[in-house]
Image: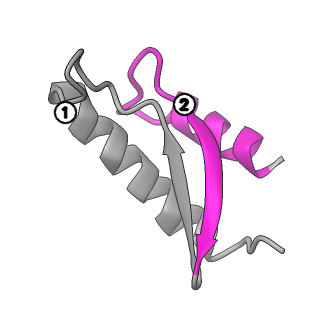
Amino acid sequence: MLLEKANKIIREHEDYLQGMYADSVEQKGNVLVFKGEFFLDEQGLPTAKSTAAFNMFKHLAHVLSEKYHLA
């Protein structure tokens, strides 16, 4: 359910990029850490889209950590 909410936020965000999604979340202290597609190249290095993905996951942490905690 939380990943569904997160992916809805991603899809509706103005900085959404095709293929951007969260596929996991974990609790680190009081912060939810989201992970998903980071748009890495063939060597596993970041691309221009990687920054957008990182910023989106950071946005999710900011918005959803105040409302939800994992058990």
The residue that disc 2 covers is: 21
How far across and how far down the image is residue 7, in percent?
63, 36
Q: Quadrant of residue 21?
A: top right
Circle 1: is it few (<14), some (14-19), or many (20+) Cα within 10 Å?
Answer: few
Residue 4 drawn in magenta: yes
Name the one closer to the observer, 9 or 46: 46
The three-letter amino acid code for the residue at tag 2 is Tyr
How far across and how far down the image is residue 66, in percent?
62, 77
**Distance in Å between CA atoms under marks 1 and 2:** 16 Å
The three-letter amino acid code for the residue at tag 1 is Pro
Q: Quadrant of the C terminus?
A: bottom right
C-beta proximity under 8 Å, tags 1 and 2: no
Left or right, residue 16 beside residue 34: left
Compared to 27, does 48 lie above or below? above
Residue 44 drawn in magenta: no
The residue that disc 1 covers is: 46
Magenta range: 2-28
Q: Which mark is residue 31?
A: none
Left or right, residue 32 beside residue 5: left
How far across and how far down the image is residue 46, in percent?
19, 33
The residue at the point 47 percent across, 36 percent down is 13
How far across and how far down the image is residue 33, in percent?
53, 62
Compared to 41, does 26 lie above or below? below
Compared to 70, does 4 lie above or below? above
The residue at the point 51 percent across, 63 percent down is 61
- Label 2: which secondary element: loop
Residue mark closest to the camera, 1 vs 2: 1
Circle 2: is it few (<14), some (14-19), or many (20+) Cα within 10 Å?
Answer: many
- Label 1: which secondary element: loop
The residue at the point 43 percent across, 56 percent down is 59
